[in-house]
Amino acid sequence: MVVVSHSGRLAEGVVELARQMAPDVPLIAAGGLAGGLGTDFDAVSDAVAQAQSGAGVVLLYDLGSAKMVADLAVEMLGDPSDAVVVDAPLVEGAVAAAVAAQGGATLDAVLSAAASALTDLASDKPVDPEDGLEIVLTNAVGLHARPAALLASTLTGLDAEVTVSFSGHSANARSVLALLSLGTTGGDQVTVTATGPDATEALRRIGDLATHNFGD
Amino acid sequence: MPCDAAAVAAAIRAAAAVITTHRDELVRLDQAIGDADHGENLERGFGFVVSSLDGEVPDNPGAVLKLVATTLISKVGGAAGPLYGTAFLRAATALGDAPVLTPESVAAALRAAVGGVVARGKAEVGDKTMVDALTPAADAAEQTAAVAGELAEVLRAAADAAEAGAESTVPLIARKGRASYLGERSVGHLDPGARSSALLLRSFADSAAGA
């Protein structure tokens, strides 16, 4: 992943935040121009080359001309098909994409995680808790960053729609940001519901994670 | 006198000098409604373009414009690098390896350049951008070339239309670029990108007239 920003510090900061939940994903900051504000085509091109690992490169950007520079850098590649500029909120998109990539998602799945980062935030729609799995979060911090990332990534490869509900709010279990926005802490009880062919396996895996205190 | 690679390179050098002369004006325009980097970025970019031309003058007009494009893309931060870079790149592609410019090829190159800017920046006429200067310029160039105008006349018509188009951005609300964040407050200001587009075309027209 490459984070293209007018500001070097902004790009570094976004990378820092995303890396916390995706330590194995190559995350490269390409921000600033000649030590000041601006977008640097050569730096972005170099970052894309550096981020290439064979699985594709996702570029995120902050403002207008950063997108233009990112688009140009992709067009100038020998094979433009394995690098994609994604229209996504920079911070939420970077975190969502990084977590998806950390979980081994394909390029398309990473792009979709980034693009849906905003809409995946927890909805206020109440859920019917009559079925599903009740889980008491016995770890200290609830569904905070690392446990949320573990929960989202344990669903990789499963064909199931999984929802985590807490206190009348629901979250897409594949979205770390949505899970974080539920605002759970240790001791809270959440409800996990799943539909789809792999629903049972999804609930089994999440139950297993909870039994093991999300690795704490 | 045929407008060959050397003539085009000379016109680019003259345009670079015009940008330097108008640097502070472009800075002021961009301070009003943007991030104040347009004048400085363009001057620096064209400075590198002149250095590139000092090293080598490619052997046809299209190759000269391609060198301009790659230099601007790599050296100009801000929107001007990718936008003007794409414009010159598309113009270069349209010219191919023809040894001299003709009225028709210049009109076609300008049309291709505008298409590149629109594709890159997604702006339309009326959004208060360089497209407001470049689109009427391409229209005027085509019309003049169609009635068998000389190369200098084609470029003069383009420059006249670009200047009028740039002026037309003053009452507009910006809908693209940094100025769009200002909304209504962008009204009453000349768009710096439209201004620099008009300056470049006027400079090219002056070079063609003097050749």
Image (spheres, rainbow, N blue to C red):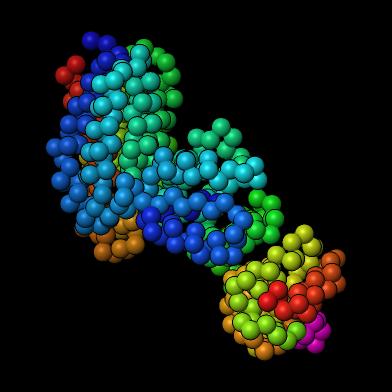
Reply above or below: B17 against B183: above
**Percent of width and height locating residue A149:** 65, 68
* Visible residue check, residue A7: yes
Towards the viewer: A105 or B94: A105
* Visible residue check, residue B168: no
Q: Which segment is the magenta one?
A: A127-134
Q: To which quarter of the image does residue A189 belong? A: bottom right
Q: To which quarter of the image does residue B117 belong? A: top left
Towards the viewer: B40 or A13: A13
| Magenta residue check for A132 | yes
Q: Residue at x 44, y 58 (%)?
A: A12
Q: Residue at x 30, y 25 (%)?
A: B52
Q: To which quarter of the image does residue A200 belong? A: bottom right
Reply above or below: A210 against B200: below
Towards the viewer: A17 or B139: A17
Towards the viewer: A144 or A41: A144
Horizontal side of B96 relative to A121 (left or right) equals left
**Percent of width and height locating residue B124:** 40, 47
Horizontal side of A39 relative to B172 (left or right) equals right
Main secondary structure along the magenta-highlighted residues: loop
Q: How many marks?
A: 0
Farthest residue, direction top: B1
**Percent of width and height locating residue B162:** 26, 38
Q: Residue at x 65, y 45 (%)?
A: A55
Reply above or below: A136 against B208: below
Reply above or below: A105 against B141: below
**Percent of width and height locating residue A164:** 70, 78
Look at the image and tell me in which quarter the C terminus of chain A lies: bottom right
Q: Residue at x 35, y 40 (%)?
A: B81
